[in-house]
Amino acid sequence: MAFEVSRFGITEKDLPLGWKVERLDRLADLNPEQIGADYPHSEIAYLDIANVSAGVIGEPARLSLASAPSRAKRIVRPSDIIVSTVRPGNRAYAFLRNVPTNLIVSTGFAVLRSKPHLADPRFVYYVATSEPVIDYLASIAEEKSAYPSVNPIDIAECVVPTPPLPEQRAIAHILGTLDDKIELNRRMNETLEAMARELFNSWFVDFGPVRAKAEGRDPGLPKAIADVFPDCFQDSELGRIPKGWRVGKLGDVLTTIETGGRPKGGVKDIAAGVPSVGAESIVGLGHFDYGKTKFVPREFFQAMTKGHVRDADVLLYKDGGRPGEFEPHVTMVGDGFPFDRFCINEHVYRLRTEPGVPQEYLYFWLSSDGAVDEMRNRGTGVAVPGLNSTAVRQLAVLLPGEPALTRFQREVGKLVRRVFATCNQSRTLAALRETLLPKLISGELRVTHAERISAAAL
């Protein structure tokens, strides 16, 4: 089956004046460069499919060229587009903005490099990763049950609506402005979480204020905050901790630890059901991959006695991974992020603490290096890697004095709420982009009108 322009809901005669239909390989070169004998770098930054999700790029692996996997071959440049040819329905694609000179991507990606005199790079990105194209590629891949994938030629042959270059640039600018704001929000959230994490580590891991007071130094905090910290230490099973604080078991302070469930099949989208969060979405504060969301029927949701998520819940991925290995993941939700109403499935715990222990403290404690190491050790080496509820209750937790916890919630709670607000804005902008994109690239919506809509949202 071939991909024709009709998959955009139009025919060639419906296109605006001056528009054409073109194959993608007419607009861009596919896989233009790969490592050869003359490659100048001995070390590479390497992106595999697991590093990329719906336009978001994770941290590349730093490898010596000699130890890199055999699939580390494709050379990329600024403004290149990468689209996974393996399970393309998982939407591992991205537009490469800032690219180090030694960035290499896996041969599991097709690289598209726009032809400057014919196509705007970002326009090609939006049309090549539009829902009609990705759904088409996914349908081809699904026919290959042994190894769901497509060939680069399957991408090359896709026929897409193509406006004149100036209009391509205008469309790319509108959609790119929305994406740039989403990316700015993502970086801002990383900064906000880093600030919160730094404060948590200073107060409850390194014990900076207590150490300063014990050594007769100014802790560098306002007096009202400094006064909530002791001025000496005591021994504990976790080592030296501030005097008057204690080490307990997580079960001592949990009021809720429960999993959810899901029926077979489920439903397609939020219009027909209720979002159900699984392990793939438990990836840290303020991160959520809406493209991987599953849904349960409303009747199933309403009948659930456990697993309904509330504001400020902490969610813990409870089982799974490679045989014999467990890698815990924790997140916190709230203020309508990621959804106003949703549930968890059977692979996730919903955790709540008693009123004296803030949810923010629970999140940062469970995602701290020490707690992650303990969970990893407890959950690895069992028949099904992961943590049962008894193991979760047995996790060690440092319990500071209530004044310190109250102050922590006051300071960090503001940062966490800003993260949620920024996430909600990004979700709105992403929804607008998804609404505008098919209408712009099919010519249904013209640039002038779309510019007004986009400007109002920003």
Image (cartoon, rainbow, N blue to C red):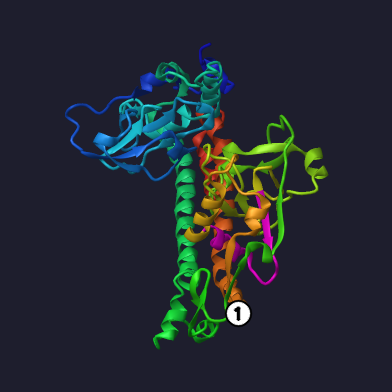
Relative image position of residue 374 (x, y in whole percent): 53, 56
- Residue that mark 1 sits on: 403
Relative image position of residue 88 (x, y in whole percent): 50, 27
Work out whether 185 lies above or below 146: below
* Residue drawn at x 58%, y 40% as measured from the top left: 320
Work out whether 196 lies above or below 157: below
Residue type (three-letter) at the residue carrying disc 1: Pro
Badge 1 element: helix
Q: Give the range drawn in magenta.
A: 349-367
* Residue drawn at x 55%, y 30% as measured from the top left: 438
Q: Residue 279 sits in which quadrant?
A: top right
* Residue drawn at x 51%, y 32% as measured from the top left: 91
> Magenta stretch: residue 79 in it?
no
Q: Residue 418 sits in which quadrant?
A: bottom right
Relative image position of residue 33 (x, y in whole percent): 27, 26
Left/right placement of residue 280 relative to residue 197 reads: right
In front: 353, or 197?
Answer: 353
